[in-house]
Image (spheres, rainbow, N blue to C red):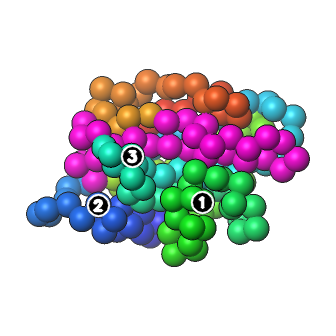
Amino acid sequence: MKSLLATLALTTALTLPGLAMARPVTLSTTLSAYGGDGAYLALYVTDPQGAYAGSLWLAGGKSKYYKHLSDWYRATGGDPAQINGITGASVGAGRTLEITLDLADALFDAGYTLHIDAAVEDMQDSPNEVAVPLTTAGAGKPVPGRRYASSFGYAF
């Protein structure tokens, strides 16, 4: 159900012509052992012009902390409709968040970028913790985060 909601949210946000084909994509974010509470993570996509295209997942259940995911929050205004049905628990230090979603094929090799904003209570926020172009060639190639994520990768 969650993958269906994520696909519908992105397909609707992108208003792609014609019928959009989708494939299951596994997103894996491994956090470093930063020594703090669980991290809130917002995974979202921007279009080739850098405009917000849709939310994929939000890890962390208390909406009062969403404003600390500043780039995502600015793009969405913190609108709960952007994440309804695509949320989960925060992610502990040294742990891995792995989710599988159906993403439209049109997002790959077309200039779209996947972003992750991160926030940890009583620690510095990390907007744009990860920013990676969605390309078929990038699948299976982990990239490091800036502060809290030791690596992020996606696979088909």
Distance Cα–Cα, label 3 vs label 2? 13 Å
Q: Quadrant of residue 6?
A: bottom left
Q: Residue 45 or 49: which is nearer the viewer?
A: 49
Q: Which mark is residue 14?
A: 2
Question: What range of the chain is rendered magenta?
Answer: 104-131
Q: Which residue is mark 1?
A: 73
SS type, badge 3: loop
Q: Position of residue 75 (x, y in %)?
A: 51, 59
Give amino acid for label 3.
Gly
The residue carrying pointer 1 sits among few (fewer than 14), some (14 to 19) or many (20 or more) residues within 10 Å by Cα, namely: some
The image shows residue 25, relative to residue 1, as above or below, that is above
SS type, badge 2: helix
The residue carrying pointer 3 sits among few (fewer than 14), some (14 to 19) or many (20 or more) residues within 10 Å by Cα, namely: few
Q: Quadrant of residue 3?
A: bottom left
Whether residues under marks 2 and 1 lie with C-beta atoms below 8 angstroms apart, the answer is no
Q: Is residue 102 left or right of residue 68?
A: left
Give amino acid for label 2.
Leu
Whether residues under marks 3 and 1 lie with C-beta atoms below 8 angstroms apart, the answer is no
Distance Cα–Cα, label 3 vs label 1? 15 Å
Q: Earlier in the sequence, mark 2 or mark 1?
A: 2
Q: Which residue is mark 3?
A: 50
Q: Position of residue 14 (x, y in %)?
A: 29, 60
